[in-house]
Image: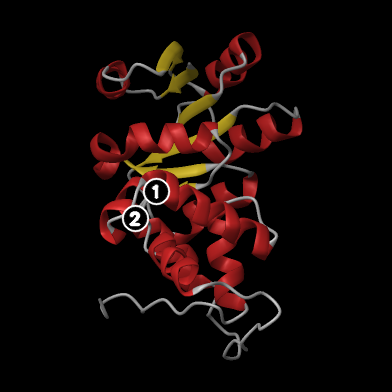
């Protein structure tokens, strides 16, 4: 059972998130709060697997709360929930130590897989945010060189490209017409070959090393 704390200063939003998570049989909301102080207190008390954290709170922003929790060495994974996808907010939160970033527009469809991924220590990014992170790596840098020392099979390269597009394992399985377990095995192999621990790290490293090319926004 994945334990979750929800912190958002809008009661309607908290109720909606609880309703979405209540449909599962492996996620349990153990507490909810409305401020940064609540987030710190509830994480200390319940030690949840995942904290769903709104960016804008009455007494603190999500970046500050995330940094404070990381300084306290808590193991709780932080899944940010917000309407904002601007660069400053996205990279501020990811650099502070957030595990995932879900846009509220995507929450109904992606919250459950995002919570599950975060609980496993995987970085989950809404597709729009994933694209922003991916394309930042190419700004102001020379064209990447191929990396023959980190070879991927054709199918692993295909899986990596789909990861870069923001697809989760289930969606990749449907796209490739294989089982979810097969995709998980491919992802595990990719992590091992690239020496990384999350899908975001894998995608960024692959782009820097020239292992995969991702189309620019608008190219399809």
Mark 2 falls on what kind of element? helix
Image quarter for residue 54?
A: top left
Q: Nearer the viewer, residue 86 or 142?
A: 142
Do the residues under discs 2 and 1 have CB atoms within 8 angstroms? yes
Q: Using the image, determine if residue 16 lies above or below residue 203.
A: above
Q: Using the image, determine if residue 33 lies above or below residue 50.
A: above
19 to the left or right of 77 = left
How many residues crowd around disc 2 within 10 Å: few (fewer than 14), some, or many (20 or more)?
A: many
Q: Give the residue drawn at x 32%, y 75%.
A: 217
What's the mark number on residue 169?
A: 1
Q: Give the residue drawn at x 67%, y 74%.
A: 150
In the rendered image, residue 216, in percent from the top left (x then y), is placed at 36, 79
How many residues crowd around disc 1 within 10 Å: few (fewer than 14), some, or many (20 or more)?
A: many
Q: Give the residue drawn at x 57%, y 13%.
A: 42
What's the mark number on residue 172?
A: 2
Q: Nearer the viewer, residue 184 or 200?
A: 184
Q: Give the residue drawn at x 51%, y 26%.
A: 51
Mark 1 falls on what kind of element? helix
In the rendered image, residue 161, in percent from the top left (x then y), is placed at 42, 69
Q: Using the image, determine if residue 51 lies above or below residue 97.
A: above
In the rendered image, residue 116, in percent from the top left (x then y), is placed at 45, 32
């Amino acid at each position: 059972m994945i334990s979750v704390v929800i912190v958002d200063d809008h009661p309607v939003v908290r109720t909606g998130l609880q309703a979405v998570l209540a449909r599962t049989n492996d996620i349990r909301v153990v507490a909810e709060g409305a401020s940064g102080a609540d987030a710190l207190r509830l994480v200390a008390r319940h030690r949840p697997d995942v904290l769903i954290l709104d960016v804008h709170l009455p007494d603190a922003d999500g970046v500050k709360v995330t940094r404070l929790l990381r300084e306290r060495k808590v193991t709780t994974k932080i899944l940010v929930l917000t309407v904002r996808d601007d660069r400053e907010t996205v990279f501020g939160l990811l650099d502070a130590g957030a595990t995932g970033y879900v846009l509220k527009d995507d929450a109904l469809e992606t919250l459950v897989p995002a919570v599950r991924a975060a609980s496993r220590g995987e970085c989950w990014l809404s597709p729009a945010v994933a694209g922003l992170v991916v394309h930042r790596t190419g700004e102001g840098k020379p064209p990447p060189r191929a990396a023959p020392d980190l070879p991927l099979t054709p199918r692993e390269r295909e899986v990596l490209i789909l990861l870069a597009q923001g697809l989760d394992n289930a969606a990749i399985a449907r796209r490739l017409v294989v089982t979810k377990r097969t995709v998980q095995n491919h992802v595990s192999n990719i992590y091992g070959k690239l020496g990384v621990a999350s899908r975001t790290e894998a995608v960024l490293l692959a782009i820097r090393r020239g292992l995969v090319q991702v189309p620019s926004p608008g190219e399809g």
